[in-house]
Amino acid sequence: MKNFFVLLFLLPMLTACKKEYGSGKDTQTYYDLTAEQLAKTPYFNNPAFDTLQFVSNKGDTLTFTKLATVSSYSKTSSSNCPDCPTNYYYFQEIKNTYQTIQGEGKFEMIQKRKSSYSNFEFSFNNSTFFLSDDHIGWAGYPTFVGSLTLNNRTFKEIIIIYEFFGDTSSNAAYINEKDGLFFFKDYNNKLNYLINK
């Protein structure tokens, strides 16, 4: 008898939940990369970066030319209960694929939108580097360098990203807003590549 009263007490609450939450419609929210986010590197707005050339400290040259820029969306979803409407979130990703036309190497760059920021993924030869767009040019970033002169060229507002976060003995990418990834240190092979622009 006691179970019967408990069931009578819970039944209205269970049916109320269905009525309250089960009648809504699914939502779809799209997060496109903004012009400000795309301007954090020159790869999407500056045609001069459709062809990239890097010269190593050993004198060999790597030349890459852009093959394609592909935009897509990754999807996530959330819901408050099994019978609730589902909220779908679509985040834009843009990928530049480059073909190697001189030397043996690889260059690729992807920018992925998140809810309030974007992430970058740079691939150079056999290394991949990840960073957030708000790190580029940020003087408070732990590896920020105000300026750096290489081969009589001065680069400004640089951050250094290591292939393995915090491991300063791993390969490193030097990145700024104006030049993108302009210097690559391959510690494994004792090679440095500097952009030739």
Image (cartoon, helix red, strand yellow):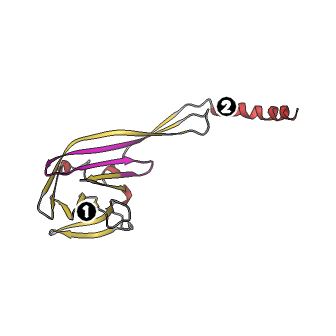
What is the x, y in percent for residue 51? 16, 49
Nearer-the-camera pick, 92 or 97 = 97
Mark 2 or mark 1, whichever is nearer to me: 1
What is the x, y in percent for residue 6? 82, 35
What residue sits right under mark 1 in the picture? 188
What residue sits right under mark 2 in the picture? 18
Total numbered circles: 2
Work out whether residue 76 can be spotted: yes
Q: Residue at x 44, y 50 (%)?
A: 116
Mark 2 and 1 residues: CB-CB less than 8 Å, in contact? no
Check the image and name the residue furthest to the right. 1
Q: Is 25 above or below relative to 144? A: above
Look at the image and say whether residue 121 sits in the magenta stretch.
no
Sooner in the amino-acid sequence: mark 2 or mark 1: 2
Q: Is 59 above or below relative to 113? A: below
Provide the residue span drawn in magenta.
90-119
Q: Which quadrant: the C terminus?
A: bottom left
Left/right placement of residue 157 relative to residue 25 reads left
Residue 69 falls in which quadrant of the image?
top left
Q: Residues within 10 Å of mark 1 (few under 14, many from 20)?
A: few
The amino acid beneath tag 2 is Lys
Name the chief secondary structure element in magenta. strand
